[in-house]
Amino acid sequence: MNKTLLFFVCTGVSLFISGCAQKVSIRALEPAEIDRASQTKKITVAGFEHDRVGLANKIEANLAGYRIDNQKYFTIVSRSDFDRIISEQKIQNSGLVATKTVVEVGNLIGAQAIISGNVGQVSSSDTNYYEERARCADSKCKEVVRYNVGCVKRVVGLSAEMKMVDIEAGDIIYADTMSKVANYYHCSDDSRTIPSPEAAGQSLASSIADDFTFKLTPHYRHFEVVLLEEADLDYTDEQEKLLEVSIKYIKQKRYDKAEQFLFDLIDTTAAQSYVAFYNLGVVKEAEGQYEEAQEYYEKADSLMVEPVAEVSEAYVRIQALIEQHQKTQAQIQR
């Protein structure tokens, strides 16, 4: 059946290679990289040593504002309480290098974990170079004059030592040095400006804070899954229409309507079309119903005579998603 009227026509070799296949975007919640962080959700962020870029404040703001489905993930112990204890105990921030001291302070303020660190100086270096330009030599531009303009490349770097200590266990949950580098360019004839090392350092600190937050928290991953749009059986005109319309609804994220048409397609093909089961699996995967999706993918796999890459990939992918989902839910519920 000619589907040209329903689906866009691919042009060019690269588009042909990637295929004209219809795809659906899927969002899956994945577990935090540092699993133990989910066991210590009542935390405080100590003032970092040499923190001229406000890294500790940026991390604290990220963690305090982090939510999953509108639910707070961490409880932040007041920085004022932390500072008060530090002052009363006459402890310097440098004293927080010792895990034993961190544990003592954590117990005093009722935190389950303390994040501390040491921020390096913002590094900055400029390199001068030239770029060639061209301009018309006369009003009719019969001749072109080539010339050079002066340019500057600025490289700014920032690194920080990060540590998260489990108060109850008395050991380190995570420790690492995180670094970021940014490149900036400016030529004398353009409107681009180069930020000062201080401003660039602030931006790099925000990036480090984001990366650190990402390690501690579950997060969504977005990916695309291919839909099968060609009949695997000798479909009737009505069955072809059911497949086409179901794909349209999937693309519009009207999964309820898509399910109705796919169930009709399964019924009218005596449950022998792996295409129908596969697409129904995609619908369930998009809805986050991974166990149901797995059932439909397994059914599609059992109906195949020859291997179909999309079905085989889905068969493997859904198993991994189920494992990841279970781990994520365990982290959230702790």
Image (cartoon, rainbow, N blue to C red):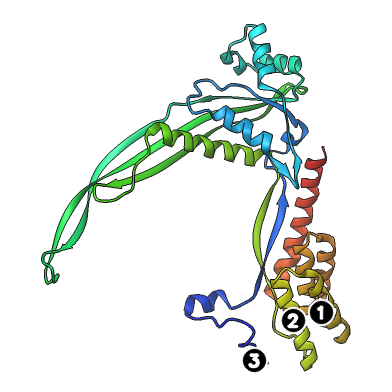
Splitting the image into 4 quarters, where does residue 152 fall?
Answer: top left
Distance from the alpha carbon under mark 2 to that under mark 3: 15 Å
Residue 288 seen in render: yes
Instruction: Estimate the x, y position of residue 14 in percent, counting from the top left.
Output: 49, 75
According to the image, label 2 marks what residue? Answer: 245
Quadrant of the image containing the C terminus? top right
User: Could you tell me which secondary element the residue under label 3 belongs to?
Assistant: loop
Q: Earlier in the sequence, mark 2 or mark 1?
A: 2
The x, y position of residue 80, in whole percent, is 66, 18
Three-letter code for the amino acid on which mark 2 is drawn = Val
Number of the label disc, if any, that sits on residue 2: 3
Mark 1 / mark 3, whichever is N-terminal: 3
Q: Which mark is residue 41?
A: none
Amino acid carrying mark 1 in the image:
Phe
Picture layout, residue 82 above or below residue 264: above
* Residue placed under numbered mark 1 in the picture: 261
Say which quadrant the N terminus sits in.
bottom right
**Residue drawn at 53 percent across, 37 percent down:** 206
Q: Which residue is pictured at 60% across the width and 13% down the height?
A: 95
CB of mark 2 within 8 Å of CB of mark 1?
yes
Disc 1 to disc 3, C-alpha distance: 20 Å
Residues 57 and 24: in front is: 57
Real-space Cα separation, disc 2 to disc 1, in angstroms? 7 Å
